[in-house]
Image (cartoon, coloured by chain):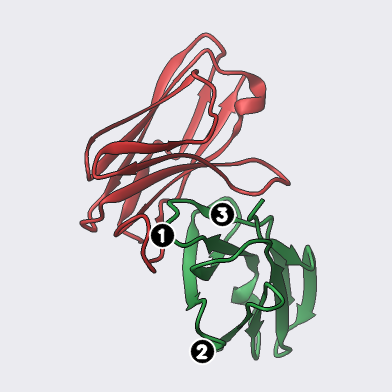
Amino acid sequence: ETGVTQTPRHLVMGMTNKKSLKCEQHLGHNAMYWYKQSAKKPLELMFVYNFKEQTENNSVPSRFSPECPNSSHLFLHLHTLQPEDSALYLCASSQEVSTNTEAFFGQGTRLTVV
Amino acid sequence: SQQGEEDPQALSIQEGENATMNCSYKTSINNLQWYRQNSGRGLVHLILIRSNEREKHSGRLRVTLDTSKKSSSLLITASRAADTASYFCATRKGGSEKLVFGKGTKLTVNP
């Protein structure tokens, strides 16, 4: 248990569906991240939030929409996804974004787009 | 790209042997971190080494950093079957919000 909880753990959705991934951290961290992990590719950083403000959008398509209502919660809203968006989506948090601190990861949401 | 690259991509050893994984990166960094991931699950932080450090230990783990060669190594001594996992290095540039990961080394420890 890392203190970062992601729900759901598994999600199957059609290309016309709208769904949301949720991440919650109880570590008092100020920075939260979304990463995408596809087979045989490095982890791809998608979004960074620092003190609830989005500070990084790594050229992510608009069909992925993040939301950070407070420092403890992070959402990833999904709509009209493509099959190639199927991947493991990982949420992480860290104390701050630019210090010598490690990131704590959730267990991920395994997303399958059909 | 600042991205780290692990080497080898896959490593298979017997229990009790040592496992060495290497990581190379391209730009100057603030720190380098190693993470472990069991199949299909989240990453777990193992160790962080700052750019002004050359070696760090944690239990059976030993990490070295050579900033002149832009490389790091992770040594797991006396490996166990439970060490079977993928291991990733990640680098953070000074002042950067990005923690950039490599593709990882898949380690299999056979009982």
> Looking at the image, how many numbered discs can be counted on the residues?
3
> Do marks 1 and 2 share a subunit?
no
| Label 1: element kind | loop
Measured Cα–Cα span from mark 3 to mark 2 = 22 Å
The chain holding disc 3 is: B
Q: Amino acid at mark 3?
A: Val
Seen from the viewer's position, the closer of residues B24 and A91 is B24
Residue A33, position as x, y percentages in the image: 40, 45
Q: Tell me which residue sits at (78%, 71%) in the image.
A: B11
Seen from the viewer's position, the closer of residues B58 and B37 is B58
The chain holding disc 2 is: B
Per the rendering, the colour in which chain A appears is red
Q: Is the Cβ of the residue at disc 3 closer than 8 Å to that at disc 2?
A: no
Per the rendering, the colour in which chain B appears is green
Tell us which disc is closer to us: 3 or 2. 3
Where is A4 relative to A22, above or below? below
Looking at the image, the residue that sits furthest to the top is: A16
Q: Tell me which residue sits at (72%, 74%) in the image.
A: B22
Measured Cα–Cα span from mark 1 to mark 2 = 19 Å
Q: Amino acid at mark 2?
A: His
Where is A83 relative to B106, above or below? above
Q: Amino acid at mark 1?
A: Ala
How many residues crowd mark 2 within 10 Å: few (<14), some (14–19), many (20+)?
some
Q: Tell me which residue sits at (54%, 70%) in the image.
A: B32
Residue picked out by circle 2 = B57
Q: Quadrant of the C terminus of chain B?
A: bottom right
Q: Tell me which residue sits at (48%, 77%) in the image.
A: B50
Measured Cα–Cα span from mark 3 to mark 1 = 11 Å
The chain holding disc 1 is: A
| Label 3: element kind | strand
Seen from the viewer's position, the closer of residues A82 and B83 is A82
